[in-house]
Amino acid sequence: LSSIVDDRNPKAKQKNDQICEEVRFATVALKKLGEIVAHSEAETPATQAERERASKLRDEDATACERLVNTPLFQPGGDLMKTQYALAFRFTAEYLQREGMMNAKAGPCDLGCIASLLCTCEPGNFA
């Protein structure tokens, strides 16, 4: 660059020096940016451990979702049906007693009481 510009003119020399300095700065900045990029892309043990932990969690979540979707809640003839029916019956009986529709001996207080409460709570059942 110095051979193209006449060094005898002070303004041209100053402009030449300024351009050379900017080129040197840009070259150093580009080199430093390359080092930063290389350092940020480097695989550290902590990064690798985090990636493995995340992968393991994704696999566990996928397995749990697969079991949830593929295992129905009610399995006729399954091992848990007796327990599920017993819990459902107990819940229903306790609810009816709390609402005053069953007496202490688990008998209905009166049919009109049960029908009126069910009609207000579950109107779709009487459609």
Image: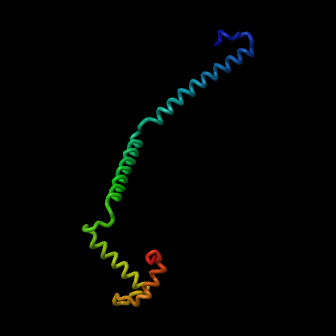
Rendered view: 78 above or below 54: below
11 shown above or below 106: above
Classify 75 as above or below 19: below
Image quadrant for the N terminus? Answer: top right
How many marks on residues?
Answer: 0
At horizontal 47% and vertical 34% (from top left) the residue drawn is 39
Out of 126 and 99, give the one closest to the viewer.
126
Residue for point 57% across, 28% down: 29
Rendering quarter of residue 93: bottom left
Please state which of residues 21 and 91 is positioned toward the viewer in this rendering.
Answer: 91
Residue located 40% across and 81% down the image: 95
Residue 116: % across, % down: 46, 84
Looking at the image, residue 71 sits to the left or right of residue 16; the answer is: left
Residue 20 place in picture, x, y as percent: 64, 19
- Give whichever of 100, 17 is nearer the camera: 100
Question: Residue reaching furthest front?
Answer: 127
Q: How is the image coloured?
A: rainbow
Q: Residue at x 68, y 16 (%)?
A: 16
Indicate the position of residue 54 as horizontal and vertical percent values. Answer: 39, 48
